[in-house]
Image (spheres, rainbow, N blue to C red):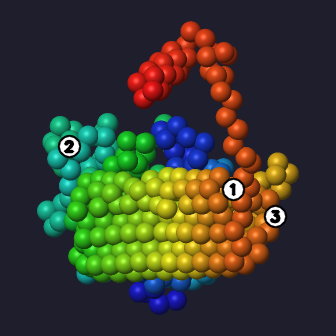
Amino acid sequence: MAENELAIVILAAGQGTRMRSSTPKVLHRIGGRTLLGHVVRQAESLGSEHVRVVVRHERDRVVESLADFPGVVAVDQDEIPGTGRATQVAVEALPAGFAGDVLVLSGDVPLIEADTFRALLDEHRRRDADATILSAELADPSGYGRVIRDDAGMVARIVEQKDATAEEASVTEINSGVYVFRGPALRDALARVGTDNAQGEMYLTDVMRILRDAGRGVAAISAPDARTALGVNDRVQLADAARILNQRVVRRWQLEGVTILDPQTTWIDDTATLEADVTVLPNTHILGASSVATGAVIGPDTSLVDTEVGAGATVRRSDATLAVIGAHATVGPWAYLRAGAELADSAKAGTFVEIKNSTVGEGSKVPHLSYVGDTTIGVGVNLGAGAITANYDDVAKHRTEIGDHVHSGSHTVFIAPVRIGDGAKTGAGAVIRKDVPAGSLALSVAPQRNIEGWVEKNRAGTAAAEASEHAHDAEKATDVGQE
């Protein structure tokens, strides 16, 4: 094995009790990925062929989350606790004779970018060190282990706060828990790490002491942004990490030509994609695998989840999940596109419209107050206000098929399964239970019947009855005056 080869070990075996969650800490999500997913993605970008993730707590769930990273190998930690043992089992799972560098990362530190890892590796090799620590400078280092350097700038030791002298406690450089080691030196030192401590654990930090006692060099490099080097241990830190990541993502899209008017209220997952000249208005969330094409306007007050938006489309004050919105289509305000909703180019889903598992053809409109479920709508269709496709018969879902250039009157209900032919029309209030042939007008009209005097007789003493009596009295007075 070449000495400059790189292996990456990611520690993801812990429970994370401070999260107070049934979900393993490393599987909590920010920016569209798990904490562990962010770490693995950055690790893979370094080009290593040997990525090992150490698992134990909720092992199967954590391993399942790695399915998107086929080159990553999960390694089980045994009964011996501690970061030192976790690293040891990962090193034992590397190819025999591996003599390269080993980069050790934590699965709960999602914000470190690949450039920082490269700088860490460069410093490690420039210093010809056996170990190099990624440190961070904090104004308030309380609770963290301090990095104590010698006169040559190398690491003399790492001191936990409870063991620090007053002088050591004043040091603001802390240990982030990210390291790179020479593989052979790490393997030898881990063999000498014991569990003789209050927790009965193998500590990885003991490796630094062992190396220094053996006269080996231990270096350190400080992270450019201390906030990104800190782990996520509770829900407060999870929210902080999500905010930092979102600021990074929003800024990246702004620099690539996306107009984002209010970055403070805009959330864009790291998994989403936007093209130049998209405009994102305040209080908008673009999440999951959503994609937005050039010239589209999204927001305000809009949420997209795993939704595709075409060029020049407008989505305003609406919610869309697993939907497709065509070029120059318009959605909203207050529309709800559910899974399987597909709007073709220049189609419209208007105010208080809900669409689910349906296609709306090119130039077709569902303007307002309508529900469209399990429906195929052709081109040039206009559904009147209050249109409903009644797709569920209490046992099964059925489809409605509406042909091209169909116009429905207000408050038409289509009882599925039913087909409306091309060019057909429906009258207002129609309840369509049978197929409508092309070019037909479908009506379901009963003769209107007015029962005179019903209110005065059946609702005597009410405001309605009094109003009716006054109206009748006025009519009589008018009649008398005309005589």
The structure residue drawn at horizontal position 25% and vertical position 59%, both measured from the top left corner, is 263
The image quarter containing residue 372 is bottom right
Query: Does the image show residue 396?
Result: yes
Q: Position of residue 417 (x, y in %)?
A: 80, 64
Label 3 sits on residue: 434
Helix, strand or loop at label 3? It is: loop
State yes or no: discs 2 and 3 in contact (Cβ < 8 Å).
Answer: no
Helix, strand or loop at label 1? It is: loop
State yes or no: discs 2 and 1 in contact (Cβ < 8 Å).
Answer: no
The structure residue drawn at horizontal position 81% and vertical position 64%, both measured from the top left corner, is 434
Label drawn at residue 430: 1
Q: Please identify the residue farthest to the front as the structure is shown.
A: 483
Return the residue nearer the eye: 260 or 97.
260
Disc 2 to disc 1, C-alpha distance: 71 Å
Q: Is residue 227 left or right of residue 166?
A: right
Label 2 sits on residue: 140
The structure residue drawn at horizontal position 66% and vertical position 22%, both measured from the top left corner, is 454
2 or 3: tag closer to the N-terminus: 2
Q: Amino acid at mark 1?
A: Ala
